[in-house]
Image (cartoon, rainbow, N blue to C red):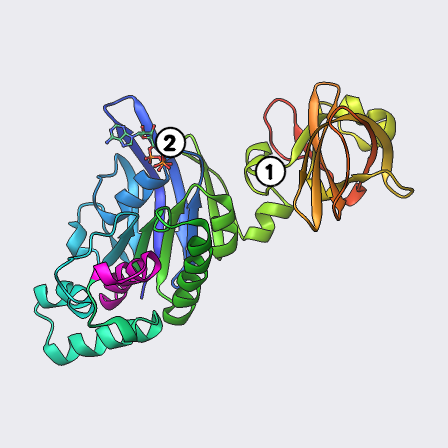
């Protein structure tokens, strides 16, 4: 097994598109690292450079001790899982799993051992003799994972492998991939644009934006101590709201509010008014999202919109006035100009 190290890696397309800028990221052996960010942030390009499907423009990439910059993909000892997992429809699941190993002239006994082991880990044992057309979408996706697994590579690379599955299956397969990785402990780099997927799967998460690494940390670190406004707004759902410090200075007390700061508030830290909170603040209900056990209420305060969290099923009307308060320990401050946490 091996870790992965990006060192000051840059990728430019056609001289002017900076897809990845100065990426330095150390992924220890056995870690499940998620690259997350909006569309166009450079995640796929970073993964493709690691796979050897794209050259690096500057910097270097190492897998274990070996710098792989000029190494062909098949020499890198990696296995990839993509969103589109073309299985051979006329072959059994066993043959689909065995195909890559046969091509590499792995001995029969060894193929059988690895395929059966992958089938065990992925709960595919009952389906080994079926054809892909006789499988559910989730089972077929597990076969695609199995093909990567039987390779027993140094590193798994996954690019949005779940985006073709429906919501329920996605949640389930997410758990399966996570469990699988914990069992085999193979270093994994997983690309997604979905922050929930990132937060539930990653040991650590690297947040990318415009080709730049904004922050890397555990899910908890990103949630509790976002390095900047971008990460704060990207991680968490509903998203953190931002208010000009001066519009809440009257309730926060000026000593508490850094000059030129923006205050970040997550929904769970904005509650209907009661003693002990900071406030009261007043606003107008802009939307109500009742989820059963909890309700998110969008509230307009001046030209800022916040989300207020209420326990249970709140009955509020759009346009109604609402009084709410903020939980002091939950407030985060960001520089109004640079967005950096303060
Ligand atoms: P998505 O989630 O939409 O796939 P991403 O974060 O994976 O986004 P990339 O696919 O890595 O982003 O793209 C990063 C930037 O590089 C984008 O601006 C994209 O248009 C550009 N880009 C990617 N591949 C090429 C290419 N082959 N030629 C030119 N530009 C490219």
Residue at 34 percent of width and 69 percent of height: 122
SS type, badge 1 = helix
Which quarter holds ligand 1? top left
Q: Which residues are magenta?
A: 132-153
Q: Circle 1 sits on which residue?
A: 232
The answer to whether residue 4 shows anywhere in this view is yes
At x 70%, y 23%, the residue is 304
Q: Position of residue 53 (x, y in %)?
A: 21, 43
Residue at the image point whose x is 28% and y is 29% from the top: 12
Above/below status of 203 relative to 302: below
Indicate whether residue 146 is drawn in magenta.
yes
- Which residue is tagged 2? 40
Q: Residue furthest right?
A: 275
Q: Residue at x 31, y 45 (%)?
A: 47
Q: Position of residue 92 (x, y in %)?
A: 17, 67
Secondary structure of residue under mark 2 = loop
């Amino acid at each position: 097994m091996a870790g992965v190290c990006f060192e000051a890696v840059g990728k430019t397309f056609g001289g002017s598109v900076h897809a990845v800028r100065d990426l330095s990221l150390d992924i220890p052996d056995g870690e499940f690292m998620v690259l997350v960010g909006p569309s166009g942030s450079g995640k796929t390009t970073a993964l493709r450079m690691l796979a050897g499907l794209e050259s690096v423009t500057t910097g270097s990439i190492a897998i274990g001790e070996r710098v792989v910059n000029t190494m062909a993909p098949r020499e890198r000892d990696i296995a990839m899982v993509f969103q589109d997992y073309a299985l051979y429809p006329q072959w059994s699941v066993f043959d689909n799993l065995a195909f890559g190993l046969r091509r590499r002239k792995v001995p029969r006994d060894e193929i059988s051992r690895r395929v059966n082991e992958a089938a065990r880990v992925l709960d595919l044992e009952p389906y080994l003799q079926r054809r892909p057309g006789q499988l559910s979408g989730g089972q077929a996706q597990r076969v695609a994972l199995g093909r990567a697994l039987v390779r027993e590579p140094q590193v798994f690379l996954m690019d949005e492998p779940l985006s073709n599955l429906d919501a329920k299956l996605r949640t389930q397969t997410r758990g399966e991939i996570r469990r699988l990785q914990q069992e085999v402990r193979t270093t994994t780099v997983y690309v997604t644009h979905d922050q929930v997927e990132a937060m539930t799967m990653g040991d650590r998460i690297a947040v990318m934006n415009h080709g730049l690494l904004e922050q890397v940390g555990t899910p908890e670190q990103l949630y509790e101590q976002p390095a900047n406004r971008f990460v704060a707004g990207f991680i968490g759902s509903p998203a953190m709201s931002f208010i000009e410090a001066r519009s809440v200075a009257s309730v926060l007390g000026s000593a508490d509010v850094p000059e030129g700061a923006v205050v970040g508030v997550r929904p769970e830290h904005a509650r209907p008014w009661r003693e002990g909170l900071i406030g009261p603040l007043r606003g107008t209900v802009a939307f109500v999202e009742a989820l059963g056990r909890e309700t998110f209420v969008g509230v307009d305060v001046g030209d800022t919109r916040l989300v207020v969290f209420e326990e249970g099923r709140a009955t509020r009307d759009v346009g109604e006035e609402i009084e709410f308060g903020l939980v002091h320990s939950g407030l985060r401050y960001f520089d109004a100009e640079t967005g950096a946490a303060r």
